[in-house]
Amino acid sequence: MICGGECVVRRGDEPVTVRPHPRVLWSAVLSAAIVVLPVWGVSLWLVGPTQTIERTWVITLGIIGMVVLLGVAVLSRRQRIVVCRDGFIEQPIVGRQRFVPREAIGRSLLFEFRGRGLQASSQFFVCDSENRPLLRMRSNRWSTDSIAAVVAAYDGPVERPRQPVSLDDLREDHPDLLTPLERLRWARAELL
């Protein structure tokens, strides 16, 4: 199997492809529309009903904003993770796909994270030999079934702490896995 640009599958090899929850996309687009549309409407009302250059600019910017929202919605369908025998391919929403060969993978961790509420979430990290994250899957973006499918297709050793971890535990034990914002002491657990 060669996994440079696309996975070429030999007989018996089955690449696993997972995509994020569709509801994540629609909640982001809906949130942006809830903020943008009222501002656009008030701006139209403030410039008045007569044909002026200001009204033309407001209408043009509103149309451009809607086209950008629709573009993000279409581009988000590109996002996926493909796990094949030689490694994995990550296709982000924007940008080029990235191939990570199996030789670059040092370890993988599957955390059960418990925030302030009772609801637990999973986070799967694939790291290099220096413990830098190569892949991060959060259960608020990826379904639990998708995370389980990637873990099963990975077929390497996966470290799983016995107890659910908190953000403070991750800050102490695995600060390299967190984003700079998550490393801050005042950051809330909802960031994960």
Image: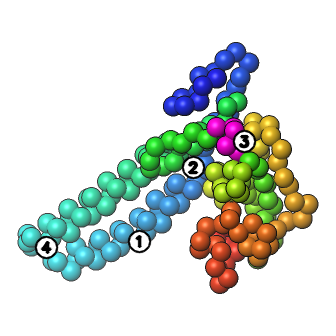
| Dot 3 amino acid type | Val
Residue 22's disc number? 2
Q: Magenta segment range?
A: 101-105
Position of the N terminus, as image quadrant, is: top right
Residue drawn at 89 percent across, 65 percent down: 163
Residue of label 3: 150
Residue drawn at 75 percent across, 66 percent down: 174
In percent of width and height, residue 62 lies at 27, 64
Side (left or right) of 63 relative to 166: left
Mark 1 and mark 2 in contact (Cβ < 8 Å)? no
Above or below: residue 17 compared with residue 71:
above
* Main secondary structure along the magenta-highlighted residues: helix
- The image quarter in which residue 67 lies: bottom left
Q: Is residue 149 visible?
A: no
| Dot 4 amino acid type | Glu
Closer to the chain start, of discs 1 and 4, is 1
Residue drawn at 51 percent across, 31 percent down: 5
What SS does tag 3 mark? helix
| Dot 1 amino acid type | Val
Given residues 176 and 138, the one toward you in this image is: 176
Label total for image: 4
Closer to the chain start, of discs 3 and 2, is 2
Closer to the chain start, of discs 1 and 3, is 1
Residue of label 4: 54
Residue 102: within the magenta?
yes
Position of the C terminus, as image quadrant, is: bottom right
Q: CA distance from mark 1 to mark 3?
A: 35 Å
Closer to the chain start, of discs 2 and 1, is 2
Residue 35's disc number? 1
What SS does tag 4 mark? helix
Side (left or right) of 77 relative to 83: left
Residue 178: within the magenta?
no
